[in-house]
Image (tube, grey):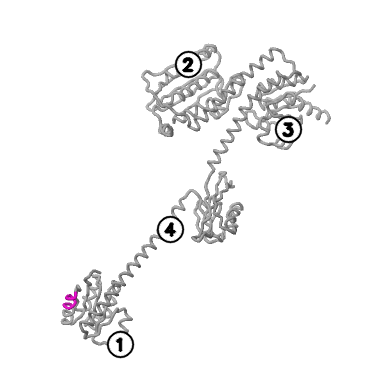
Amino acid sequence: MAKIVIIDDDHDILDASSLVLTSKGHEVLTATNPEDGFQLVKEAVPDLIILDVMMNEPDDGFFLAQRFRKNKITVPILMYSSVSKTIGMSFGVNELVPVDDFVEKPISPSLLVEKVEHLLQLRREK
Amino acid sequence: MSGHPKVLVIDDEDLLRTGVQRLLEMEGYVVDVAANGTEGILLGTKGDYDLAIIDLKMPDKDGMEVLKEIHTVRPNTVCFIATAFASFDTAIQATKLGADGYIPKPFSVEELLQQLELGNKKRLLLLETERLRKDRENRLLEIAFERTRMNTIVNALEDGVLVINKNGEAVLFNPSALKYLQLNEIVIEEFLIPKLHPQIAELINRYLLAEEYLSKSFSIQLALSDSNETFVQLTCSPVPHPDGSLAGVVLVLKNITELKKIEQLKSQFVSMVSHELKAPIAAVYGYLKLISDRSIQLTEDQQQKFIERSEFRLDALLKMVNDLLDISRIEMKTVRREITDLDIPAIIKSILELFSLELKNSGLTVNFSFPENLSFIQADAEEINRLFTNLISNAVKYNKLNGKIDIAVSANENFVITSIADSGIGIKNEEKKKLFHEFFRAKNEFTKEINGTGLGLSIVKRIVDSYSGKIEVESEFGKGTKFIVSLPFRTSMKIKNDENEY
């Protein structure tokens, strides 16, 4: 059982994702914009952050990920994206996109669970 | 020279002068006479004589001096020197000084006529030469003029033009070429290739270094490293010699920055549209996966809620697709506009009736005022309907429970002005700028449950703009928003043109 923060401006995605993860026994907290998300992560200290790429601005997610890292928040980040294939980004950690993995929307619950468990496993092993 | 050659006889001997005059007049010549050198010069320079017979020895002036004076003004008058002191030396001297012939005195009638006959032929040749010379001068002038004109045109071109010969040397260029090639100067005949951008040099070398004449034109696009982010399209075409070999190349540089910007806007729009279309699909997909996933137990309430949310999102998706189709129709102007006389208050009344259920459910009060006898505007009914439906729909959707909507129509000389004010959630200052952008939706705690495509106001703006109208917004966050639409009474030229296209 882990504490997970999901930051996404789409309420339905938040609802569906929360339900999937709570059904697996995780505690889920949500925020609908980058600023609230940042504060929530700082206060709640989660084991995993799930972050949407496009919120108010198309690259809000990237900036927020960078902001976490700059503030020494090393919690693994799983990024939701609906554009990853389109922009052809490499799925890896780099300075501009300091995240640990991507899930492309629409999200399949089983894939989401799989990726979340994998990242939590890696974190436990560290 | 007509059939009657004009002759000037200059001689101080009266007898000879009049004798020659009579004789020549009988032969069909027109004859003038001068009794001394001074008079001779006067007549000979004033009139354009075909021929002149000048006595070498006159009391006032020497015949050679008279000849010189006449030739200065009339180089094509054929002049004979007549003298009794005939000698071989004087003949040569006279000819050296420009005499066309030499008549020794005394002369026989035959001798004189024979000389004059030769003189006539010479006169004709001189005149022809003169004509040709003038022709040539005129042509040179024309060429010089053409060249200046071409230079002026080339220099005035907004497009850059650069001509390079087959040795890679500059032949012609204009100021725009300097600008787009980012060069401070080009010297005619300098070897230019090394000074050019490598991509341009490579393109030119394709022609210059080709073994066979390359007849195709090639274009490349370059981003200039200037502060304006200028994009230039460069087209290189070969210039052939008459024998088909390469004379050089001509480069035309066109500023395509605006096109590039439009291209960028288009691709941004496409990427935004893709994202906006994908979002509701992702949400519905997520819910469906939850419902179908047997490992996740849902309560009936949850299932019901997910189905309702899915319907809500799909409904929004459908509206968005319809809005997008409308936008592309307005953009591509494929809307066949039917311009008719429209009564704006009547249109607003009918829209309000359509919203009566929503108005009642939200407890909204509508105050509607408009002047009597308002003139009709000329526009397409469907578009004007769409415009006010979108605005009234926003005033309903973004209002508060039991709020109000104030609609007022007024007119000035040229415009009908309609203001639609709600008592709703208002718009934050920083969001006003983006209000008419595609897919912009104010995001706050009030708006999350409101269904919208983010395209309604963008469509409104496009319609207003297409009629050369104006839309303004006044708003205070938390208190309400007022849209003021001004539409011209008469259709602008812009719309008439649109009509003509189909």
- Calculate the distance from the C-alpha at mark 1 to the C-alpha at mark 2: 122 Å
Label 2 is placed on what type of residue?
Leu
Viewer-proximal residue among A48 and B123: B123
- Calculate the distance from the C-alpha at mark 4 to the C-alpha at mark 3: 66 Å
Residue lying at 54% horizontally and 11% vertically, measured from the top left:
B361
The magenta segment = B21-27
Q: Is residue B468 left or right of residue B304?
A: left
The verdict on a common chain for dots 1 and 2 is yes
Q: Nearer the viewer, mark 3 or mark 2?
A: 2
Residue at image mark 3: A99
Chain at tag 2: B
Label 1 is placed on what type of residue?
Phe
Q: Is residue B286 above or below residue B115?
A: above
Q: Residues within 10 Å of mark 4 (few under 14, many from 20)?
A: few
Helix, strand or loop at label 2? It is helix
Chain at tag 3: A
Viewer-proximal residue among B360 and B135: B135
Q: Residues within 10 Å of mark 2 (few under 14, many from 20)?
A: some
Residues at circles 3 and 2 in contact by the CB criterion of under 8 Å? no
Residue at image mark 1: B88
Q: Can residue A28 be seen in the rendering of this structure?
A: yes
Label 3 is placed on what type of residue?
Val
Q: Main secondary structure of the magenta part?
A: helix
Residue at image mark 2: B352
